[in-house]
Image (cartoon, helix red, strand yellow):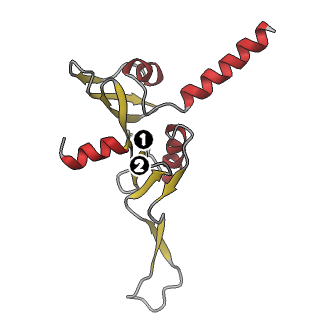
Amino acid sequence: MKTALTVAAGIALTLLTANARIGENTETCAVRYGAPQKLELDEKNTGVAIYRKNDLVIKIHFTNGSADLINYSPGEVARIDFETAQYLLDINGRNKEWTQLTDTKIDIHDVQSEYAQKISWQYVDPILWETKDGVLVASYSDNTGVLEIKTSTAQQKIRQGL
């Protein structure tokens, strides 16, 4: 009985930590990503931490000690493609349902060549998402390989120039 409870608690804890990135504090982020390469927080625990994990650069903004913006950037070799961006959205979404606000791809027709047989496409840049409840927003650029996930309040602060 004790073993079953311990296993159930372990599974619950794993699921909780796997889905709780926005809203985490600096200590939880250090456990997840390792010691930050750079940590600049003021007396209210507001500021930025920069981590490196799996050859990705992870920049996190904290407001009052809680992560409200996460920026995933490519490293030397690793790249964030569209599928990876979708995966990171899912694990950062705290079980929220995302709505994609922009098209993913657009067709490119070569008007210069009447013999062009192949229609090519490109990703829309940036691709934007929002959770159905409007709490989280995200953007992904295929050109730069950067994914940014933030709370809508962080988005409002950015728009206001804070």
Q: Position of residue 99 (x, y in %)?
A: 51, 56
- Circle 2: element type: strand
* Left or right of 90 in this view: 55: left
* Left or right of 57 in this view: 116: right
- Tell me which label, 1 or 2, sits earlier in the chain: 1
C-alpha span from label 1 to label 2: 23 Å
Q: Quadrant of residue 96?
A: top right
Q: Nearer the viewer, residue 103 or 64?
A: 64
Q: Position of residue 141 (x, y in %)?
A: 38, 54
For badge 2, the amino acid type reads: Ala
* The disc label shown at residue 138, or none: 2
Taking the spot 50% from the left edge, 30% from the top edge, the residue there is 20
Seen in the picture, residue 68 relative to 160 is either above or below; the reply is: above
Which mark is in front, 1 or 2? 2
Seen in the picture, residue 136 relative to 31 is either above or below; the reply is: below
Q: Position of residue 25 (x, y in %)?
A: 39, 23
For badge 1, the amino acid type reads: Val
Q: Quadrant of residue 48?
A: top left
Q: Position of residue 76 (x, y in %)?
A: 37, 39
How many C-alpha atoms fall within 10 Å of the one at disc 1: few (<14), some, or many (≥20)? few
Residue 58 in view: no
The residue beneath circle 1 is 77
Residue 106 in view: yes
Taking the spot 19% from the left edge, 40% from the top edge, the residue there is 162
* The disc label shown at residue 13, or none: none
Seen in the picture, residue 143 relative to 108 is either above or below; the reply is: above
